[in-house]
Image (spheres, rainbow, N blue to C red):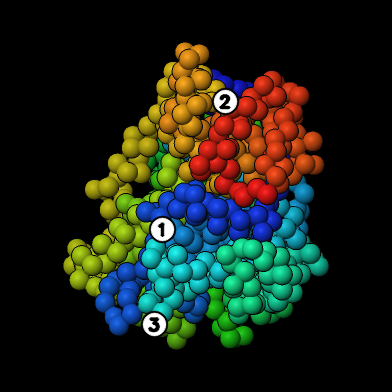
Amino acid sequence: MTDPNDATTSDETETTAPPLTPMSLPMLLARIEHEWETRKRIFDLPTARFWKPDTHAGGGGIDLSFEFLGRPAASPIGPAAGPHSQMAQNIVLSWLGGARLFELKTVQILDDLDIARPCIDMETIGYNIEWSQELTVAQSLEEYVKAWIIIELLKRWEPLHEYVGAPDEGGPGPHVFDMSVGYDLEGIQSEKVAGFIDGMANATDEIERLRAQIPDDSVFAQFRDIDIPPNISDTITLSTFHGCPPDEIEAITKHLVAEHDIDVIVKLNPTLLGPDGVSAIVHDTLGYDYVELVPKAFEDDLPFDRAISLIDELHRFALDRGHRFGIKLTNTLVVDNHKQWMPDQTMYLSGAPLHVLATAVLDKLATALPGRFMISGHDDGSDDGTGGDIMVSFSAGVNKDNLADTIAMGVRPASVCSDLLKPGGYGRLAPMLKALTQAVGDSGSTDLDAFRAARLAEARSGGHEATVQAHLAHITGDDLASYHLTGNEKLPRSVDHELEMWGCVACNFCVTVCPNDAFFKVPTPDSLATEIEAEGGSAGRQQYLVFSELCNECGNCLTFCPEDGDPAVIKPRLYVDESRFDAADGPRFLIGTDGSITASAAGGAEGEIPRLLKVLGADEGLPLPTT
Ligand SMILES: Cc1cc2nc3c(=O)[nH]c(=O)nc-3n(C[C@H](O)[C@H](O)[C@H](O)COP(=O)(O)O)c2cc1C
Ligand code: SF4
Ligand code: SF4
């Protein structure tokens, strides 16, 4: 890969984000149909990475379902608010992989901001500077409704039943969309954001408008008139990032419960441990000496004592109004940008060290509020009669290796962001669920409640008060290496070769690490291989191309590409939207609906048209039908 530290300075890297241009519903459906016919994949995910619940009609199997604030979901994992829950195809990909709880990308009133690029750095642990949604609020609503509709269509589509389960045989099971909003009361009260929340609670108009777009010649036309539940979401996770003051958190939560009749989760930050507590873990225990904390982040954020009174107050407020309340641990940690690969002065840390921080926050909160949380060992009733019913959702460095231990703590769901940005991408979800299924079975249980009970008994017999303490002891003891700097220093693989438009080591990483599924691959046609080899080059097994409208230059494929160069810039950049093609620069190609190709004048793109025609005209070809 291009060494981030050598490649650029912050001034050089700063660019204005190209606007993401979502694909229309008909185009997404056409892409699904065409990919299935030509590749047996959907949005580049092979069927081997689809998840099928292990429950069968008539009983048997391991049941991974849980209740999210009282709503059923067939698995306890899903994408955390971030790049995997912004666009329709991202959400569908997560669903195919087994996600059943979706914390949607945070929506806020400021919806035309320029995010500096690159904005994601998953080279070792995780950092990002992606502090806002990139779509307009109206586009976000449309993306979420499109995803909701596509999942309803796919559930009924017979060819998929073999891979995700048939509805009458226990699969694919229910799923929940959870909204995420931020960051201040005024914005949340605005017509724009209030309209979004109401539109998600009752999306009848949007569903009717979109379902009419399902083309007559689509395999999905048979489902155009199915019942699609209009209540897409009536829960909200409040993102309290960026120093949202305690009184604001209180006012927003009460406003959402009282005015929108909604169950609320407040997403808290690792700053709850205070600077000394965070430093003790990040520096002393985990060895990340180079991570520089930002004092202001602690000054602006919710202090621990206030968090305790706030959780108590908001829980009671919600209960009094017949609503449920929960907390989410945690958002990312604000740190100084020591790498300067991404342009902003601060960046947000996620992944392995955050897992330890979030577990420590949970331990501290559970100790301070005994019997109040719905987590193992604490959910057996509190002295004041409120019971342990504050749900705890978790997102911090969750991966295949720690998912079972995380779920054993009693959190629901465990949502994932950084791990899905690593090679394998959405394809990492199904193996996580397989590992969880195995762990549940190994504990002698057939569902998550029994699994948690078994793990609680095990923790107590090991001398721990509850499973949270057992997990914290494990990740800072026996399993410290998985979270310590020394276990997280390895850089992505790199080869000494300049990346070119055609041919590469064909590792497929650009396809899988892209949260937007902007990349696709096509097997190299023989004629192209012969031509490139005659020139002394190597064509590689596959050619990689990018749908540029879906690329926001986040930088994640640049990080993981083993060759030297940026795949999103060097590989053939295709456009299907003429205005976006016209507005862009650099070598690029416009694909007409009839399959015709127009090249930009820049960078010798015209000369590449014959090769592009060979690739797109091959059997798998462009993953979109042409007339
Ligand atoms: C690129 C990126 C974008 C994110 N965007 C949001 C967001 O819009 N809203 C939010 O509440 N959290 C956001 N997060 C935080 C995640 O939802 C999650 O809480 C955090 O990354 C910890 O999980 P992880 O260690 O699995 O990444 C983002 C994280 C990343 C890495
Ligand atoms: S193609 Fe690369 S830069 Fe573009 S969105 Fe995907 S991962 Fe990010
Ligand atoms: S362009 Fe994509 S497939 Fe080719 S080497 Fe880079 S990451 Fe791997």
Question: Residue 217: where, in percent of width, then height?
Answer: 64, 63
Residue type of the residue flagged with mark 1: Phe
Q: Earlier in the sequence, mark 3 or mark 1?
A: 1
- The residue beneath circle 3 is 381
**Residue drawn 62% across the image and 69% down it:** 221
Front position in the image: 426 or 602: 602
**Residue drawn 46% across the image and 60% down it:** 96
- The residue beneath circle 1 is 50
**Element type where label 3 sits in the image:** loop
- The residue beneath circle 2 is 501
Question: In this rendering, is residue 427 above or below 147?
Answer: above
Question: Residue 366: where, in percent of width, then height?
Answer: 41, 67
Q: CA distance from mark 2 to mark 3?
A: 62 Å
Question: In this rendering, is residue 39 above or below 465?
Answer: above
Q: Earlier in the sequence, mark 1 or mark 2?
A: 1
Q: Residues within 10 Å of mark 3 (few under 14, many from 20)?
A: some
Question: Residue 327: where, in percent of width, then height?
Answer: 52, 67
Residue type of the residue flagged with mark 3: Gly
Question: Residue 133: where, in percent of width, then height?
Answer: 67, 52
